[in-house]
Amino acid sequence: MTGNVRPETMERITTPALAQAFIDEQVRELQAQIGDKKVLLALSGGVDSSVVAALLIKAIGKQLVCVHVNHGLLRKGEPEQVIEVFRNQMNANLVYVDAVDRFLDKLADVADPEKKRKIIGAEFIRVFEEEARKLDGIEFLAQGTIYPDILESDGVKAHHNVGGLPEDLQFELVEPVKLLFKDEVRVVGKALGLPDNMVFRQPFPGPGLGVRCLGAITRDRLEAVRESDAILREEFAKNGLEGKVWQYFTVVPDFKSVGVKDGKRTFAYPVILRAVNTTDAMTATVEDVPFALLQHITRRITAEVENVNRVLYDLTPKPCATIEWE
Ligand code: XMP
């Protein structure tokens, strides 16, 4: 796709047939642009990078090299799903980088949320750069830039690019969905055969669970965030809230409270549940989750998640709270 302005005549992609026409056109354009050269893509497993990967696999197959960096801050099951869908099902050229210890070591003792974000962003670029240097003959860098990224900022949002790569690693950009809105990217993803839980997933911040494990990240609390988030997602899916609520997740603060289990005193972390609705993320209202479901989720989390003895529901809209806690 050339140019950064969506033509007024461009039809909104709302149906499988329109998505298929878009895919066919993109495949032709990508093949013409790339020829027999190689393309590199940072594949997080989010909707945008996954759709770009699937498009490129269709267009150029193994000339695409996907790099999936596991920074330890992903949700339960995400790295495994990326490997399953892209390597096993789509037969993609996928480099999986286990960078968990590296990220967690860098983040140890860092409590300031903005410092945490900077470390995660900078370390991501460093890991990606190291992987890029191991590969020969890469000429293009693919990115999951979408139209709101172009509208909202002068270039592309940090979580959609690996800008910041050194001078000698500047590649020509390939951005096949840069004129699409999110709902269109989802329709295209579905037409490309990506699984629903990848295509229709809720927004997930670039720093991932790192900003939901409050203060300085510790492995025990990070696991508590990951496990409780998995339970919340599972229960929302079972109870018809998955497609209804805009964003829902758990947060684990860095303090403990007293509890009691099997007749013994415990001293453990609380889990905070958050479920909000919004259209633009600038303001948000709290989902009115049925009380019985909140009680059921509380029972499951306190029974199944280690180091947790209390569950709270955040009733605060945005403003005055933000959606995330950090
Ligand atoms: P807040 O917390 O500001 O969040 O009300 C608004 C939306 O932005 C997401 N968010 C982020 N996304 N990198 C991202 O890619 C970040 O650092 C970040 N912080 C917040 C948040 O999940 C919500 O959807």
Image: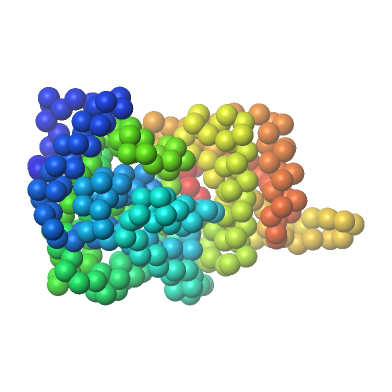
Decide which of 321, 301 is in the foreground and name it. Answer: 301
The location of residue 136, given as percent across then percent down, is 20, 72
| Residue at screen point 24% across, 49% down | 56
Left or right: 88 with respect to 176?
right
| Residue at screen point 29% across, 73% down | 130
Decide which of 87, 237 is in the foreground and name it. Answer: 87
| Residue at screen point 33% across, 56% down | 92
* Residue 162 visible in the picture: no
Left or right: 176 with respect to 113?
left
The location of residue 255, given as percent across then percent down, is 65, 60
| Residue at screen point 12% across, 25% down | 9
Please state, as top left, top right, bottom left or bottom right, where the N terminus lies in the image.
top left
Residue 132 placement: quadrant: bottom left
Residue 13 placement: quadrant: top left
Q: Is residue 231 above or below residue 266?
A: above
Check the image and tell me how it is coloured.
Answer: rainbow
Left or right: 261 with respect to 49?
right
Q: Is residue 293 above or below residue 110?
A: above
The location of residue 322, given as percent across then percent down, is 46, 43
Q: Is residue 40 above or below residue 241?
A: below
The location of residue 84, given as percent across then percent down, is 45, 53
* Residue 325 visible in the picture: yes
Left or right: 171 with respect to 285?
left
Total labels: the figure holds 0
Residue 268 placement: quadrant: bottom right
